[in-house]
Image: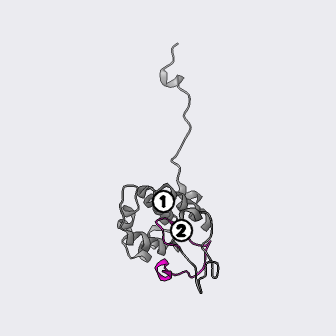
Amino acid sequence: MTRSAKEDAPALANTRLWDPVEYLETPDDVITYLEAAFEDGDPRVIAAAMGDVARRRGMTSVATKAGLGRESLYKALSRDGNPRFATVLNVLSAMGLRLYPLMKDRVGTEPVKVGEAGWSSGFAMPHTDLFVLSGERFPSSAQRASDYR
């Protein structure tokens, strides 16, 4: 009696694609995930990561708060999307997040606080080309960096 090749093949395990949305449980999870995407620097990775967070928060809700259609948001935040910078800012705001400029040598530190750099009020945010995300970690009412120049 001969067995077929199919009968001799090992049983395959049931698998499914890894979905980061399942692991974005806390605000710190979201911030850490988005910071890693921004650190990567690839705009497609950043857009896709923002899309993951938007899916976790509810794509329809985020789209409404950002003033966009749900389908437009899905397209803009896909790995192949290319959202305008205004869209990125609106979506981050809709998700309760902000971008802060931070000097490259200050990565991993909090923004300079009142009095630390001679500023009379607010946070001092140095002019630079690197942005970091902030949400629950820095619940202050920081102003734009250009206000301090």
On the question of residue 26 being in view, the answer is no
Q: Is residue 57 magenta?
A: no
* Residue closest to the far front: 118
* Residue closest to the far bottom: 120
On the question of residue 141 being in view, the answer is yes
Nearer to us: label 1 or label 2:
2
Residue type marked 1: Ala
Quadrant of the rendered image containing residue 21: bottom right
Dominant secondary structure (helix, strand or loop) of the stretch shown in magenta: loop
Q: Badge 1: few (under 14), some or many (20 or more) residues near its Cα, within 10 Å?
A: many
Residue 75: % across, % down = 36, 62
Residue 110: % across, % down = 62, 70
Circle 2 sits in a helix, a strand or a loop, which is it?
loop
Question: In the rendered image of this protein, does residue 129 appear above or below residue 2?
Answer: below
Q: What separation in Å lies between label 1 and label 2 (alpha carbons)?
A: 20 Å
Q: Earlier in the sequence, mark 1 or mark 2?
A: 1
Find residue 102 and name its label: 2
Q: Is residue 145 magenta?
A: yes
Residue 54: % across, % down = 48, 66
Question: In the rendered image of this protein, does residue 142 appear above or below residue 3?
Answer: below
Asked which colour scheme the image uses, the reply is one colour
The residue at 49%/60% (across/down) is 38
In-front residue for pair 91/18: 91
- Per the rendered image, the range of residues in magenta is 126-149
Residue type marked 2: Leu
* Residue closest to the far top: 1
Q: In this figure, which residue is indicated by the disc labeled 1?
A: 49
In-front residue for pair 20/8: 20
Circle 1 sits in a helix, a strand or a loop, which is it?
helix
Residue 43: % across, % down = 41, 58
